[in-house]
Amino acid sequence: MYIKLPPIIYCDDGAVAAQPSPIILDSPHSEKRRTRVLGVIPARLASARLPRKVLRQIAGRPMLAWVYEAAKACPQLDSVLVATDSEEVAELCRKHGWAVQLTSTELPSGTDRIHAIAQQIDADIYVNIQGDEPLLTAVHIDALLRPFARSHVEVSTIKVRCTAADIANPNAVKVVTAADGCALYFSRATIPFDRDGTGAVYWKHIGLYAYRKDALQRFPTLPHRTLEMTERLEQLRFLENGIDLYAEPVDHDTIGVDTEDDLKQVEQILLARR
């Protein structure tokens, strides 16, 4: 599958500049068959912090509508479906002609929900598109898939330059990576620690993921270890169990909707785009 994506080029100030260049999603298999990419939107209705948030209206439309249409606008995804534990959400999807699959209410996370879908629908790469990210664009998904040009990459995510307000904010998860983008650690703490005040660059993690099928199949069997439980960050389960996770930079942040204030802020942004 050919993907026309800009390579990442860093300017002197650390900013990201884009230049056009095509890449190919590579496969660990010897044959160069077409890579199948499935986008899955986990849409759990019983959210603890903001109940029923995927159905909440934003600028006159359900939040899920903004997310689904952004995903459908990404040509790298062969198909997109909603994975939900709610018949009410499923009915909304059917009404709008969106592909939907009901999953168990007992699944503990979005990744587990995508794993359940993988038992029914075959693909090479599964993209976890959070149902509470209405500012998502196709550019974010493009970046998420870029690391898969390297056949050894099993799991990817994205990151954005951290604003000054978010550097010390524990709700804004920070990530540090090796030179090749392989994540070294994710934390709610301020990492790296700028001991000498030299002006460290901080990166905020955006919670979108893509997985090769083999890595996704392993996820439910991985033990919950100390760091994941301490930070309350699911992505640390991969790192603690020896699965590398690559974080690709993007220029623009998203806003995951968890509160009424988030909802209002996102609505103002979407209305301003019209």
Image (cartoon, rainbow, N blue to C red):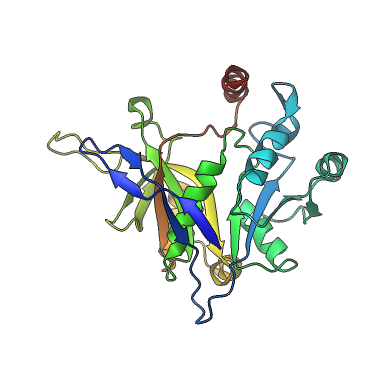
Residue drawn at (64%, 45%), measured in percent from left and top? Answer: 71
Q: Residue drawn at (47%, 49%), measured in percent from left and top?
A: 143
Q: Is residue 189 visible?
A: no
Which quadrant is home to the N terminus?
bottom right
Q: Residue lying furthest bottom in this view?
A: 30
Q: Judge left or right: residue 32 versus residue 112.
A: left
137 or 222: nearer the viewer: 137
Point out the image quarter for the C terminus.
Answer: top right
Task: Please indicate, yes or no, whether residue 25 appears anywhere in the rendered image.
Answer: yes
Q: Is residue 26 left or right of residue 44?
A: left
Image position, residue 33 (x, y; %): 58, 74
Residue at point 53%, 53% (across, down): 209
Q: Position of residue 90 (x, y in %)?
A: 83, 45
Q: Residue at x 56, y 70 (%)?
A: 218
Of 100 and 187, the residue lying toward us = 100
Viewer-side residue, 161 vs 145: 145
Residue 23 on image: x %, y %: 45, 59
Counting from the top left corner in percent of width and height, residue 227 is at 41, 55
State the image quarter where residue 68 is shown. Answer: top right
Image quadrant in which you'd find residue 262? top right
167 to 32, vertically: above or below: above
In the image: residue 126, left or right of residue 203: right
